[in-house]
Image (spheres, helix red, strand yellow):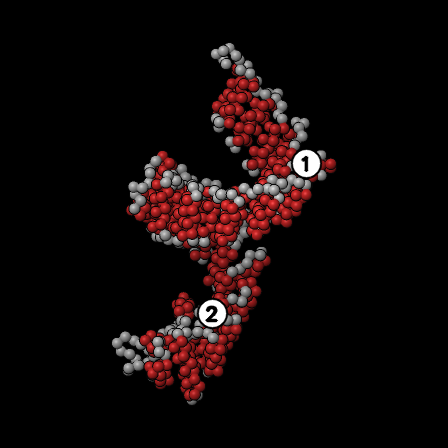
């Protein structure tokens, strides 16, 4: 044009600027805009509008706002479209306040906000969770004769419907849907898809399937997206059979599954640990000519590692590379995480180091069988470690006790321009505090705050744990106060750390005050909370307060086995025999598993205090209910009856004992484990369980007599378990 002596006009520049913005050449577009006055052309409202839209498209609304100011200085008046473009862009970024100020500025310029303006505001409010504010604007728009606002259109209704669904306000969404149907604006597939999303998100899967069927009846053909919405909900809720049925219905309706459909189903199987079924989905997917993407393969790869199918994971990595899917950082992170889980942290560290120079080709050393199979192309070299990579490595190095190596990786990460986030900082804090390195933890905390990462609940919990290990209760209380000042509510874990420390220091009453504080603030204590308090009271012989804590615990946690076992064992250890017996009787009535109850010790103690009848009652009740308990429990009672001369009753119990041995109802394992954990004293017979009876050397005539009866055939099939190698006690 210039060579032909044809001078470009503003319209010419507008076309070229539009083309440059459309081609993502925003810098060139701006340069052209700036030279317009030098070419004798002045930008008009369309020129500004095109460039502002370009800035907003790139997520740079502030640059667009500067152009709006320049526009006024140049005497060009903005139109509604320019304002709407800026308002929508600021709303999308979540800057609702700036958007609101632009609406006011728009009115000052004599422009009336239209439905597009209001739709942007409503959409932004819904996205930021301010659904009630959006609902008020929506309601005002519906009564325009009062406020003079534009009437809502189908976009407005869709925004509100989506907002209600995401906020879990299903009844409001249902009412709005009925209103849309009544006004004939619930007519297209987009309306149905939004409604399907609402139902699925709120767990109404059967209703969602019904709506999907109704669509065709109402003349609206479901799309692949419609089916995928419902399929995703079914898979996430583990309804894989229904998902397969829905896929068959899809195909019958001539809507063929796409990559998203298959990937969703594959992910559902992987979540359930059904790797074989997931692989079948992958094969079916490829058989139908549907190409898997990285997400599909990475999902299956992650599941294989999780299920310990390492050789299959290796094969999948090979196939991914051979078929040119391109391993990405996610793939590498899955392998690194898997290696850490299987204890091969050093191999994982080696891969991370190699990724910086070789990208995904760093996986070449994985398993010594994949070395030459990774293409070290440009894409592979772009596959670099990220924050998740380093978070995984640092966490596992700390777990392995390799603190120096973990610190080196932290320094290396920062040197690679990967700046740690709060997750990594909190990981380091947790491990340092857990190992009692509180001073180092507070140094890390300073660095964390200097980098702009704020303290979170996890941060405070780690620090309180560290101080608790040092028994620095005053400092712990100071952190709790600081938490409250910053509006961070302590959780049950925070309180448990505090309560544990106070109980260990004998300050149980202060710990009880914290329990009361928890209840007042609606923080539900767990079993560990009550265990700490009950043990603390019982340790000092304060059984009545322990009972009161038990009453609170049973009202919150229910009458469960662990709670009764705790009370029974603690009261028994404290010498409160009759109270302990009552807890056991209640546990028997409730048919609890007795694995954690030291019932043999109770029977032994009852016999010692000459309460033989009470001990026999316990045995009788257990037999009557049908418990398979340790036959060794009979021995103190049998001995006691023999001493009192009640030979017939003793023989009856001995026969029942041997019947239990022959029936194989000896369930002693859980009982022994509990005793080992609690360091309680061993039985007076020198050992635990039935084997202790065999090796008794107290000359009990009853025991020897019963064992000889076993030899004659009472306990066939069980005799070998009662014999010692070489020298059998029965032969002696």
Q: Nearer the viewer, residue 562 or 293?
A: 293
Number of dots carrying numbers: 2
Question: For the residues marked 1 and 2, what is the alpha-carbon distance in whole angstroms?
Answer: 66 Å
- Residue annotated with mark 2: 593
Counting from the top left corner in percent of width and height, residue 237 is at 51, 52
Q: Is residue 732 above or below residue 340?
A: below
**Residue 167 can be seen in this image:** no
On screen, residue 334 versus residue 150, left or right, reads: left
Mark 2 falls on what kind of element?
A: loop
Q: Is residue 539 left or right of residue 708?
A: right
Task: Tell me the quarter of the picture where residue 48 sits.
Answer: top right
Decide if residue 523 is on the left or right side of residue 344. Answer: right
Q: Residue shown at 56%/43% (left/top)?
A: 222
**Residue 182 in sight in this render:** yes
Mark closest to the chain's N terminus, 1 or 2: 1
Q: Residue furthest bottom?
A: 645
Graded by Cα atoms within 10 Å as few (under 14), some (14 to 19) or many (20 or more), the crowding at tag 1 reads some
* Residue 652 spot, x, y in % from top left: 43, 84
The residue tagged with tag 1: helix, strand or loop?
loop
Query: According to the image, label 1 marks what residue?
Result: 151
Q: Residue at x 44, y 74 (%)?
A: 628
- The location of residue 465, given as percent across then percent down, is 45, 54
The crowd level at tag 2 (other Cα within 10 Å; few <14, some 14-19, many 20+) is some
Q: Nearer the viewer, residue 598 or 326?
A: 326
Measuring from the top left, give residue 518's x and y in whole percent: 55, 58
């Amino acid at each position: 044009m210039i060579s032909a002596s044809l001078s470009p006009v503003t319209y010419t520049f507008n076309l070229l600027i539009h083309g440059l913005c459309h081609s993502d050449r925003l810098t060139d577009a701006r340069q052209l805009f700036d030279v317009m006055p030098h070419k004798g052309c002045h930008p008009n409202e369309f020129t500004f509008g095109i460039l502002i839209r370009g800035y907003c498209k790139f997520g740079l609304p502030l640059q667009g706002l500067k152009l709006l100011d320049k526009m006024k200085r140049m005497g060009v008046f903005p139109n509604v479209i320019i304002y709407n473009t800026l308002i929508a862009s600021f709303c999308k970024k979540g800057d609702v306040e700036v958007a609101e100020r632009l609406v006011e500025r728009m009115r000052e310029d004599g422009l009336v906000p239209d439905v597009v303006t209001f739709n942007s505001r409503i959409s932004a409010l819904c996205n930021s969770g301010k659904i009630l504010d959006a609902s008020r604007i929506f309601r005002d728009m519906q009564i325009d004769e009062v406020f003079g606002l534009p009437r809502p259109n189908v976009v407005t209704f869709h925004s509100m419907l989506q907002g209600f669904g995401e906020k879990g306000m299903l009844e409001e969404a249902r009412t709005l849907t009925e209103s849309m149907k009544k006004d004939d604006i619930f007519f297209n597939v987009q309306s149905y898809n939004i409604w399907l999303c609402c139902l699925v998100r709120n767990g109404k899967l059967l209703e969602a399937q019904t709506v999907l069927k109704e669509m065709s009846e109402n003349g609206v053909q479901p799309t692949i997206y419609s089916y995928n919405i419902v399929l995703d909900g079914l898979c996430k809720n583990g309804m894989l059979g229904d998902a397969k049925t829905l896929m068959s219905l899809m195909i019958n309706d001539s809507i063929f599954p796409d990559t998203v459909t298959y990937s969703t189903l594959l992910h559902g199987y992987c979540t359930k640990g059904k790797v074989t079924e997931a692989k079948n989905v992958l094969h079916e997917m490829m058989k139908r000519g549907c190409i898997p993407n990285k997400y599909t393969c990475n999902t299956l790869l992650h599941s294989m590692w999780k299920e310990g199918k390492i050789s299959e994971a290796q094969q999948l990595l090979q196939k991914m590379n051979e078929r040119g899917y391109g391993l990405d950082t996610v793939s590498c992170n899955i392998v690194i995480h898997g290696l850490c889980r299987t204890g091969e942290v050093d191999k994982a560290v080696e891969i991370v180091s190699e990724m910086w120079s070789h990208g995904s080709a760093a996986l070449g050393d994985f398993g010594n069988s994949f070395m030459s199979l990774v293409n070290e192309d440009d894409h592979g070299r772009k596959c670099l470690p990220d924050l998740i990579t380093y978070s995984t490595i640092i966490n596992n190095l700390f777990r392995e006790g390799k603190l120096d190596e973990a610190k080196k990786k932290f320094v290396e990460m920062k040197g690679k321009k990967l700046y740690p986030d709060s997750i990594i900082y909190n990981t380091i804090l947790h491990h340092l505090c857990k190992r009692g390195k509180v001073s180092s933890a507070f140094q890390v905390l300073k660095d964390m705050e200097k980098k702009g990462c704020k303290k979170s609940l996890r941060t405070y919990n780690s620090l309180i744990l560290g101080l608790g290990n040092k028994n620095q209760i005053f400092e712990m209380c100071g952190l709790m106060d600081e938490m409250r000042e910053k509006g961070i509510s302590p959780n049950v874990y925070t309180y448990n750390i505090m309560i544990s420390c106070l109980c260990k220091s004998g300050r149980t009453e202060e710990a009880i005050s914290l329990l009361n504080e928890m209840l007042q603030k609606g923080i539900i204590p767990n079993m560990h909370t009550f265990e700490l308090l009950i043990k603390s009271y019982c340790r000092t012989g304060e059984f009545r307060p322990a009972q009161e804590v038990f009453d609170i615990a049973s009202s919150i946690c229910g009458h469960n086995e662990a709670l009764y076992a705790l009370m029974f064992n603690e009261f028994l250890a404290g010498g409160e025999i009759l109270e302990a017996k009552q807890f056991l009787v209640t546990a028997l009535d409730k048919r609890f598993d007795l694995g954690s109850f030291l019932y043999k010790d109770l029977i032994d103690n009852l016999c010692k205090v000459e309460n033989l009848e009470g001990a026999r009652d316990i045995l009788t009740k257990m037999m009557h209910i049908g418990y398979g308990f340790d036959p060794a429990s009979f021995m103190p009672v049998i001995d006691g009856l023999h001493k009192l001369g009640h030979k017939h009753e003793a023989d009856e119990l001995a026969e029942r004992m041997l019947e239990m041995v022959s029936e194989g109802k000896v369930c002693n394992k859980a009982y022994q484990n509990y005793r080992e954990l609690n360091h309680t004293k061993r039985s007076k017979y020198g050992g635990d369980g039935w084997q202790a009876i065999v090796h008794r050397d107290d000359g009990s005539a009853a025991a020897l007599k019963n064992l000889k009866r076993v030899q004659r055939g009472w306990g066939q099939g069980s005799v070998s378990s009662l014999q010692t190698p070489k020298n059998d006690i029965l032969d002696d």
